[in-house]
Image (tube, helix red, strand yellow):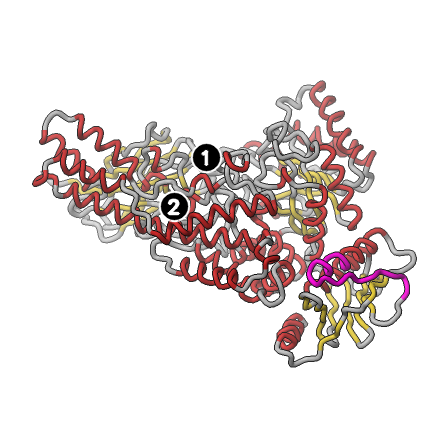
Amino acid sequence: MLVIRLSLSFLLSLGVLCALDLRQAVIVVGANASKPQLKAAAMMAEEVEKRTQIRLKTSTVADGSAITLKLDPAVASAEGFSIAADARGVTVTGHDDRGVVFGAGYLLRQLRMGRQRLELADGFRVTTSPKVAVRGHQLGYRPKTNSYDAWTVAMWEQYIRELAIFGTNTIELIPPRSDDDADSPHFPLPQMEMMVEMSRICDEYGLDVSVWYPAMDKDYSDPATVERALKEWAEVFRKLPRIDAVFVPGGDPGHTQPKYLMALLEKQAASLRRYHPKAAMWVAPQGFTQDWMDEFLGILAGEPRWLTGIVYGPQNRLPLAQLRRKAPGRYPIRLYPDITHSLAAQYAVPDWDFAFALTEGREGVNPRPLDEAAVFRSTAPFVNGFVSYSEGCNDDVNKFVWSGLGWNPEAAVRDVLVEYSRFFIGYDAAQGFADGLMALERNWKGPLMANAGVDVTLQQFEELERNATPQMRANWRFQQAQYRAHYDAFLRDRLITETEQENAAMGELGAASSLGALRAVAKAEAILDSDRRTERALELRARVFELAEGLFNSIRMQLSVPRYRAIGLRRGANLDAIDFGLNDRGWLKERFAEIRAASAESERLDRINAILNWTNPGPGGFYDDLGNLALEPHLVRGEGYERDPEFRASPLVGFGNRYPDQGWRVSWFTDAGSMFDAPLRMRYEGLDAESRYKVRVVYAGDTRVPVRMTANGVEVHAYRDKPTPVAPVEFALPPDAARTGTLTLEWTRTPGLGGAGRGCQVAEVWLIRIPEK
């Protein structure tokens, strides 16, 4: 049926089919319409007017052409609806109140709307119901976000309405006390007041309200602490007009042993149900160590009746399939997917180029439709639905992909994007904008230097902008995509330039024996310090800044700390990182200072030679720059993102917590890592069986935990801390390590730890053949 509907829309756009003209239609609702049904009628009238300049009247009586909204429990199933068009107009029939709201939203997505134009394909019919029970998104009004903290009540209602138009049935709120600052300079209302308003809005649309409520106190074994927590939470429960669920994470933030956490939640569940009798209580074993996970599963085995279900989110030691097998079947599992972060995340961007990670960062504008669909489909067999983890509007496209697939898991991702684009951008631009969103995802695939598609993506969006109306150019979703396209293209242009600069500087160092060390260093440094940005790059950079200003004005997106009072660089303020260095200039300048300080020319030349031969493993050796997709041939690959989006059995490209401008090599900033207790492996074949080898390794990454290395299963070194500061370390391999011609190096972090699961992170590896004496 979906294919037929799209074909009808396509034919309508060609003028092949007759169109039902709805400009004179009246929106008809029953005399006893419920609050959500009235909201559906208002939503229909207001969204049509925004796009057509036509204000449809609302009535309880049909008189001529009509868009009728009504309820009939015999139609479809829970939350479902049917839509039927004929010469008299369109009838939307919902199975229940939500079905009416979702049916009205679906109709809005199918209409052809333009100035003084409102049409639907004549004879349009559809009957549909959602396949996934829980389809939600977390919308946290708190300082830590990259936009939400500046939204007004009206902006919140608009966004919640838009999510409902695409079938979202749950909105998750965050209480005033979490791991955030106490206030934000952007807050239009105090947190508790806005939380009440958001709960009220959801109730008016008939949507479920969930509350993400971290247990923040230090010691819940203390009865006095528990009593204070009960009073604090009860005040929130009492003030909110609607709560359907509370979700308590076991960590990040909060860190409470399961036996104390579950005892607290039993009491909180009783308190919650005094104010909201049907509310559910959910818990996530987030950040648990292995010991705590075992304790948690032991408590679940007793099947406490006050607990509704389990949430699976970031920092869960057990893979989802294992958690489903080990937890009692009476407890459903709800997914809490991180759709907002691109690195140091549950579902990080696979094989991301360092230049993107360094500049666009953890909370950049991140449309990832195919990646999100891969996560959805790999997790769907084990869960009853999802409420996504979001830190702002940077992940807007991802929300609507999840909501679309939650309604129809078989939907083609591009079809979801076309509906998104048709409704938010415009009927005529829908196909091109949807293709542009998919192109933005492709921009982030593989080495940026080699990805000429980045420039093609920019051309697509420049073409869309040339044909855009003034209203479209002011549309924040249009601005977001333009921002990413221009930022990506600027970054690639600069990466090419700075790579060429470094190569030229290394060429001068290579002539040091004839030029003299100090002269070679001076010439190399002058090249690195020169501004060689192209005219095109400067134009792109200026446009990025213009778009950032537009986004702050249109949707309060805080892309800079000094300009827009963002809370921090890693919280989406990537305008402040746009000029971060993309080569080894910082590291080289530190080496140049050491060379100048040397007293003898021979020492200076030796130091230059060490720079030039940094990656040289010598005769019969091998070098891998882990995290650099072009220079890690010995890394053992895993199952791939579609099957393993959490990198449970696949190496993850990771990034360190110091930047090249701060003196790190680019090769230290990137690394390959494994998650939790899984090993990271490198495999060598065709080695000289008669030779002995040693390994030189750089341990870097963003997490400092002890790491162990083995060679063909034999320990090379026990668990040891990573060197500070970062520097290569060498270890001799067992004498017979290469006797079969094959060598597997394996690294693991200390087993059983909790937290995010990272830490086994290796940046560079040299396998060096030891010359015979």
Residue drawn at x 17%, y 48% as measured from the top left: 620
Nearer to me, 263 or 46: 46
| SS at mark 1 in the image | loop
| Residues at discs 2 and 1 in contact (Cβ within 8 Å) | no
Residue 390 in view, yes or no: no
Residue 354 image label: 2
Residue placed furthest toward the bottom: 16
Question: Residue 671 at x, y = what percent?
Answer: 37, 42
Rendered image quadrant of residue 234: top right
Q: Give left or right: position of 752 versus 509.
A: right
Q: Give left or right: position of 238 versus 566.
A: right
Residue to which mark 1 is pinned: 751
| Residues shaded magenta | 44-61
The amino acid type found where label 1 is placed reads Pro
The crowding category of the residue bearing disc 2, from other C-alpha atoms within 10 Å (few below 14, some 14 to 19, many at least 20), is many
The amino acid type found where label 2 is placed reads Phe
Question: Residue 179 at x, y = what percent?
Answer: 60, 30
Residue drawn at x 42%, y 43% as measured from the top left: 578
Image quarter of the C terminus: top left
Residue placed furthest toward the front: 470
Nearer to me, 542 or 633: 542
Nearer to me, 287 or 688: 287
Rendered image quadrant of residue 380: bottom right
Q: CA distance from mark 2 to mark 1?
A: 29 Å
Residue 89 in view, yes or no: yes
